[in-house]
Image (tube, rainbow, N blue to C red):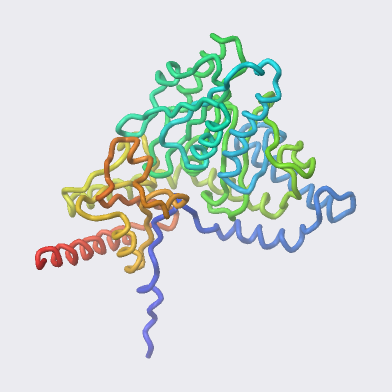
Amino acid sequence: MKKNTNKKNKRIYLDHASSTPIDTSVYNILTKTTKTFFGNPSALYLEGQQAKKLIEDSTASIARLFDIHADEIIFTSGGTESDTLAIQGVVRGIMTDVAWKNRRPHILVSAIEHVAVLETVKQFTKQGIDVTLLSVTSEGIVEPKSIRQAITPETILVSIMYANNEIGTIQPIREIAKEIRHARKKNKSSYPYFHTDAAQAINYLPIRIPALGIDMLTASSSKLYGPKGIGMLYIKRGVLVTPILFGGDQQQGLRPGTESAPLIAAFAKALEITEKIKEKETLRLLVLKKFLTLELLRAFPSMRSNGSSEVSLPNILNVTFPGFTSELLVIELDAKGISVSAKSACKSDDPEISHVLAAIGKNTHDEGSIRIAMGRSTTKNELIHFIASLKTIFAKYNTVRKKS
């Protein structure tokens, strides 16, 4: 009888920070609504109105989870577009304000933001906008007092991510929000606005926006076990954001183009599931992360952890193995059926070291730093197999080095 090798050949996926597999319930919603709700939601006939109703119901569901108004949600293609709309939209809004005609706007971001934020603000430096990159601690934390010191009367936007995508460090968002409110009061201004990229945080951290004290928030379905191609930007009522795309008046004119009712419905379902299992899943992953950290240190005493051990997401562990390159470890593990990454997938083809590790003072150009990002499918046995695979890889190259 032929043996079943499916279990033996099953790959171990440890890159959930990059992209999550779609949840079965979410997939079922997506396929069902794709077939049924095909009408253009802007149309007046029945099929269009059915699609519009699905969008309205899904938006209302999302609004309840975030404790916000439905009209404060703008659907986008994902996290990158949401970050870009937040930053470019605020800057363009300022440029139309006569009160800012002779003033030089200032933007404040941390040095470890996602590249979608960093590359966007970089473009504005060429257009006369001042940009300050806030330094972080060796654990990757933005200190709230540094926000107060860096804000000027010209600061129009502060963008600090809720949790980092490479090292998992959680930022003190509420304390930062307090500093921003203090600056507004001092300068008697509605600026600066406060934006946070919460793409990595939503699976594990509180998301009720009024309690966070933010003005804009980025979310991405592809990080939440939902489909790719859909995300959102929360924009608080009264925040001045102008469109960066043109061609229609959908979504209050801020994001033109025919909305995808099926993607929005699937996104809403993904958020609903995430919120329902958040507490239990967070506790489960914390146990696995502690186990993984201790076992890796036991097997590889020279290993270093990057980021904070106290205020970090439960699913991300970023570690460095001296004497090995990141690329080598990623490729060797892939050959053994294990998926990890060296840094953000958005910069995976960049030969330079991670800007996040550089910002926290880790000069790892010649050393192997990898991000292990667990998820709902991760088991203790998978982590045991991952560690055993690393041991095999290390033994292989240490033998070669001894012979040479």
Choose between 16 and 349: the one closer to the eye: 349
Question: In the rendered view of the protein, which quadrant contains the N terminus?
Answer: bottom left
Choose between 257 and 91: the one closer to the eye: 91
Picture residue at 47% right of the left edge, 34% below the top: 162
Give the answer, above or below, for where 62 lies relative to 103.
Answer: below
Picture residue at 69% right of the left edge, 26% below the top: 237
Asked if residue 177 lies left or right of residue 236, the reply is left
- Which percent across, then down, holds residue 284? 38, 48
Choose between 351 and 398: the one closer to the eye: 351
Q: Residue furthest right?
A: 45
- Which percent across, then down, holds residue 83? 57, 39
Asked if residue 213 lies left or right of residue 16, the reply is right
Give the answer, above or below, for where 77 lies relative to 403.
Answer: above
Give the answer, above or below, for where 259 lies relative to 113.
Answer: below
Asked if residue 318 lies left or right of residue 60, the reply is left
- Which percent across, then down, holds residue 80? 56, 44
| The quadrant where residue 98 appears | top right
| The quadrant where residue 208 appears | top right
Choose between 40 and 311: the one closer to the eye: 40
Question: In the rendered view of the protein, which quadrant contains the C terminus?
Answer: bottom left
Give the total number of marks visible in the rendering.
0
Give the answer, above or below, for where 125 lies relative to 82.
Answer: above
